[in-house]
Image (cartoon, rainbow, N blue to C red):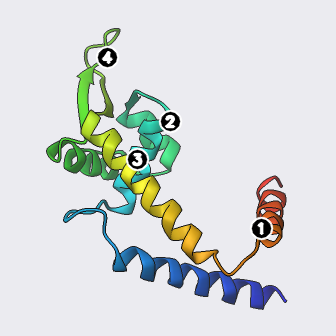
Amino acid sequence: MIANFFENMYRFRRLMTKRETKTTISKKSLTKAQLIIMIHLGQQKFWNIKDLAKCLKMSPSAVTQSVNDLFNNQLIIRQANEKDRREICISLTKKGVKKLNQTRKYFLESMTELLSPLDDKEIEKLISLQEKIISQ
């Protein structure tokens, strides 16, 4: 039974990946690392590289590379921390917020389409099962 679960999860992930590559939000789409960084910046306005890397369980150099790409695409800004000028904080620009909202909308539409074979009760049961697993 567990083997079937893992096989289904693998097939589900492949289906999601297919949908991600079929449709792009813009000519230049985000990498997964960039998207995760932007999601965190959308939840908490200011982050420094060190704390963000620790939170994401990524190396500071990997976060810095993604941040540089986001900065070059004008999706984030860098600001010196007012209390410690040596520390740089990053936050989303208006363009970054817009891009994050477009991405969220795309994923919501994609998941809605993916789950369309299920009725409301089945979706509620799926959510309930996910919450049960996550809460362990």
Residue 66's place in the image compared with 96, above or below, is below
| 32 relative position to 129: left or right | left
Q: CA distance from mark 1 to mark 4?
A: 47 Å
Q: Nearer the viewer, residue 19 or 6?
A: 19
- Crowding at dot 1, Cα within 10 Å, few <14 / some 14-19 / many 20+, comes out as few
Residue 53 position within the rendered picture, expressed as x and y whole percent measured from the top left:
43, 43
| 126 relative position to 101: left or right | right
Residue 67 image-quadrant placement: top left
Disc assigned to residue 11: none
Secondary structure state at the residue bearing disc 2: helix
Give the residue type at disc 1: Asp
Disc assigned to residue 43: 2
Q: Nearer the viewer, residue 104 or 113?
A: 113
Secondary structure state at the residue bearing disc 4: loop
User: Residue drawn 35% across and 45% down?
Assistant: 60
Circles 1 and 2: CB atoms closer than 8 Å: no
Is label 4 or label 2 in front? 2
Residue 103 position within the rendered picture, expressed as x and y whole percent measured from the top left:
39, 56
The residue that mark 4 highlights is: 81
Is label 3 or label 4 in front? 3
Give the residue type at disc 4: Asn
Q: Earlier in the sequence, mark 1 or mark 3?
A: 3
Q: CA distance from mark 4 to mark 2?
A: 19 Å
Q: Earlier in the sequence, mark 3 or mark 2?
A: 2
The residue that mark 1 highlights is: 120
Residue 118 position within the rendered picture, expressed as x and y whole percent measured from the top left:
72, 77
The residue that mark 3 highlights is: 101
